[in-house]
Amino acid sequence: MDERLLGCFVKVYESGNIHKAAEKLFVTPQAVSKMIKKLEDELGRELFTRSPQGLSPTMYAHKLYSAANVILSECSRIKSEFHESATNATHTLHIATTYGVPKYLTLKFVTDFYDLYPDIHLDLVEYPEYPIYDMLQSGRVDFAFLPQPIDLINYEVEFCFSHDFRAVVNKNHPLARKSIIRYPDLNGYPIILKGRDFSLYPHNITRFVKGGLNPEILLEISDDSLIVEAARQNRGVGISATFLAEEYADEQVVTIPFEDETFIRNVFLVHRRGQKMSRAQESFWNYTTDWIDSNLNFAIRNSELS
């Protein structure tokens, strides 16, 4: 599959507009339209529905978007690796993360690292969770940020942070008046949530059923902004990490905590067990644990005191 076509598709998907995508790609709108049509012909599926209001991604576009990002990131990694080898550049660490981790850690996590280790380059890319384990096992990445459950026999882990989840609804939704959500409250409402690319998915489905919810899944997606957008349009009840739900929410959206205090995600820094760390790897491992303790845990302690 042509890398250029996938790159064009990602720009159109993210902007929702042919002209905006063309501006970002420095090509004409006609060229963008032709590339999208060529990709649709190659896949045999319609990726966008056209209307006077713009483009709307189809279910096939949502599915392709996650895969396209993985493919493009891998292409970028390979090019970077060969370039590094050819130019004898500074050492590069390849780090895979499940979705949302870079946003939680913020850009400060990276810039503070570069201040301490200017000779180490971080190639930090978000992926669906299941491919990350293959990358770790094959040595294609040095580290990964992953949630439980993790195979502790094959991997060393260091706890990083926890976050909880919120139900996200339109302000006019019947649940919007609730101050707390119990699982049975969601019965009869379509649910939008992160899906089977995430290891928590089967555990959460089990959690819902045991809690008295027979989940009616409307959409499984990796992008929390679209989860919130679906709730904004009153398509159903979104379930999103609190820090992402609150970032994407506006006055049309209400976010509500769950009664179940165990409905959380614990995220760990993961390294393949038995693999001797290089100096650069040791630097990143130690930096991450120290930075999180000084920044995230310090912020939590301050909020508890205030």
Image (cartoon, rainbow, N blue to C red):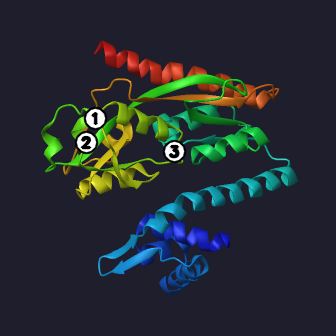
On the image, the x and y values in percent for residue 290 come to: 59, 20
At label 2, the amino acid type is Leu
Pointer 1 with pointer 2, Cβ within 8 A: yes
In the picture of the structure, the residue carrying the numbered disc 1 is 183
Q: Which of 150 and 24 is in front in this view?
A: 150
**Above or below 146: residue 9:** below
In the picture of the structure, the residue carrying the numbered disc 3 is 99
Q: Quadrant of the rendered structure where residue 79 is?
A: bottom right
Identity of the residue drawn at 66% across and 69% down:
3
**Above or below 66: residue 6:** below
Identity of the residue drawn at 56% across and 22% down:
159
Mark closer to the observer (1, 3): 1
Q: Is mark 1 on a helix, strand or loop?
A: helix
Identity of the residue drawn at 34% across and 23% down:
261
On the image, the x and y values in percent for residue 219 come to: 38, 55
In the picture of the structure, the residue carrying the numbered disc 2 is 186
Compared across the picture, whether 260 is left or right of 20 comes to: left
Q: Which mark is residue 270?
A: none
**Above or below 56: residue 236:** above
Q: Quadrant of the rendered structure where residue 243 is?
A: top left
The quarter of the picture where the C terminus appears is top left
Mark yes or no: residue 278 visible.
Answer: yes
- Residues packed near mark 1 inside 10 Å, few (<14), some (14 to 19) or many (20 plus): some
